[in-house]
Amino acid sequence: MAHQPQSTPPTGPATRQRLLLVLPMLLAFALGLFLYHGIGKDPNAMQSSLIGSQVPQFAGETLLAPITTVTQANLLGQPALVNVWATWCPTCRAEHEFLNQIASQEGVRIFGVNYHDQRASAQQWLLELGNPYVFSVFDPKGVVGIELGVVGAPETYLIDAQGKIIDKLTGELNERTWPPLRDQYLALQAGVDNAQ
Amino acid sequence: MRNSMCFGLVKALMLMLLLASSMSFASIETYQFAQPEMAQRFNDLTTVLRCPKCQNQNLADSDSIIAKDLRAQVHNLLGQGQTNDQITDFMVQRYGDFILYDPPFKRSTLVMWLAPIGLLLIGLSVLWFLGRKPAAQAAMLTPDEQQQVNNLLDSDQQLDIHHD
Amino acid sequence: MRSGVLTSVHAFASDPDRGYFVLVLLAITVGGSLLLFALRASTVSSRVGYRFWSRETFLLSNNVILVVAALTVLLGTLYPLLLDALGGGKISVGPPYFNAAFVPLMVLLIVAMGLGLGAKWKTINPRELTRSLTSPALIAVVLGVAFPFIYDGQFNPSTSLAAALLTWLLLASWVDLKRRLRHQGWWRGLRQLNPGYYGMLLAHVGIGVTALGIAVVSHYDQQEDVYMAIGDEVKLGQYEFVFTAVTDVEGPNYSAVQGHVTVFKGGQLVAQLLPQKRNYHSRNQVMTEAAIDAALSRDIYVAMGEPLENNAWAMRLHVKPMIRCIWLGGLMMALGGVLAVWDKRYRRRRVDTNPSLQTPAALGE
């Protein structure tokens, strides 16, 4: 039983005190709602800081014969995907069939960046699993990766015909993650077609 | 008896601490630097840059591929004579503000930076204003009782309170 | 919560299910306790008044500081999320922010602790407080400034500060102790003091010890990653590390390559360290076992990395001064807590119901 030395008036200070006491609980509840809303979002999905800017300059050798030097200029001309992959990356292996599919059936233009890999095993991989790439840049030291802001594999960039980076997907490209990219790709493609 | 039990426990705890074994850790890289102060800058930079992959670790501690690459990159850039700012700019350009552990002092982060001081001032002022209220709730004691109480408070001894 | 909300050092799992579970758990515990607070807080009232300048006020100010520190951690963790949700972009908060916010608060806390020790319960004359604590403050400053010169030969502000704070706590405790023993002889007085009081002193000093450990190891820590061949000697700080041999050893479930490193200080043998690179048979996994020579004044640490062709090995050498003090301070705090609970007055049946005598001092600090 509350035993207070002074008598308190029925309204005013007592109500205010009660309000103050309930406040922490309400704040905690609000915080809980906020946290609930955030569950399921990918914490590792760092916004690529390159979105909206040009594909950075790089130079590297192609993976397959004939081995030539390619630069960012070789990516221009049409909207395309740039897919970072490696033989040591199990998710890349899982995603590969899907890449084959969209390349052959939907005619999507895909360039590859073979990241921190060995030439022989990478070439063997493409032989066995199929090659959806126009070409793959051989990047054994991750130099091209750093220029692109690559964090790991697989990652896929969407670039437009002029080489501007439109979007970036961190993680596997599959039926679930492809539609938003595809919509943008098709919009870019339509833009190019109309301009011609 | 209680005291010796306590002491035994203390000894055991200290022994455990001192025999703590180590765990495995990130690989050892031996970077050579032209000048010793560059080694210090390398340490400084790799501890304020977050590993983009293992985001709970900084570049110095992380063992992921990208962390190794970026450490090598920092080493390179230091060798090329770039300043600390240039090197962090390089990283931010490619990986965003997120790669810096130190949040930039922008308008959007002003609240966060000023919050600790602000909260402290609020807390202490509340204390001040509450304290200024007269102590009307203090029970009234006779001067003798007050003296008794003061002595009790001062001496802090093991007293038998239920003596009257 | 790696369920997608926070990237924090307390990653539970990258999995929404576990995130929901933790959220529900928090809702029950935090929500429940705050509900209890809302319903019952008004029934908790202080029946004993105290003046503004009193030990009680300093205790309250300590609580304010501690709460602000906790809120700062909460804010630093949640702010990136809030900003991202409001479209302000992704920023990252890490050790630089927390250090910048936390350290000044802790300094303030320790200063206030000393003031609290100098103050009496219920009321103290501010002038008397100043008088009793002026010499402790001055001595603390002098010893604080002297410390890095004695330890290292040159000045360093943060270790100075930590040493000054520890001295401040020790001397303020001394002031309080002296006051309590004022009325009787030393030996009798000390024996009659509650375990709880000793617990309080121990815990307070423990904080200072930890602070000093942290400051010293942050500034005087030395590390070298270097290639060493058999017979090479590397100097790190006051120590010489000599790589004398490499042998093969067998453990119960592993085979290891063991390095022999002898550590000298000014020609005197300090330690023989045996770092290993172990290959565990069952998992075929290579793990590094570092070798540590531990002492309260410093840890010496040696670990082996990868070998080169000419039998040179990459070695990591560490000298960490006073790092065990951090744990020692923690132990002191824990023991202080144990002693405080040991106080007989908590186990005495409360016969006396006169509310004016139930002061914090009478019930144990």
Image (spheres, rainbow, N blue to C red):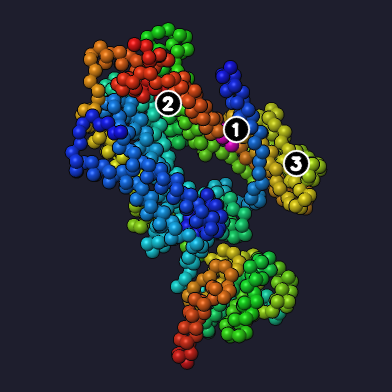
Residue tagged by mark 1?
C298
* Chain-order first, disc 3 or disc 2: 2
Does residue C294 sit above or below B142 in this rendering?
below
Q: Are marks 3 and 2 on the same chain?
A: yes
Residues beneath discs 3 and 1 located on the same chain: yes
Q: Which residues are magenta?
A: C320-324
The first of marks 3 and 1 along the sequence is 3
Q: Is disc 1 placed on a helix, strand or loop? A: strand
Name the chain letter of the residue that bears numbered label 3.
C
Left or right of B65 on screen, residue C63: left
Which of these two is toward me, C334 or A86? C334
**Chain letter for the residue marked with disc 2 in the picture:** C
Amino acid type at circle 3 is: Gly
Question: Per the image, is C20 magenta?
Answer: no
Q: CA distance from mark 3 to mark 1?
A: 21 Å
**Do residues under tags 3 and 2 come within 8 Å of each other at their CB atoms?**
no
Give the residue displayed 39% in from the left and 21% down from the top: C350
- Residues under labels 3 and 2: Cα distance? 44 Å
- Return the residue found at the far top: C185
- Expressed as whole percent of the image width and height from the top left, the position of residue C130 reads 30, 23
Q: Which residue is mark 2?
A: C169
Q: Residue furthest bottom?
A: A196
For disc 1, the chain is C
Looking at the image, which residue is at 34% across and 23% down? C359
Q: Residue at x 34, y 57 (%)?
A: B107
B110 to C361, vertically: above or below: below
**Amino acid type of the residue that numbered disc 1 sits on in the rendered structure:** Arg
Residue in the foreground of this view, choosing between B76 and A153? A153
| Element class at badge 3 | strand
Q: Residue under label 3, please give it.
A: C259
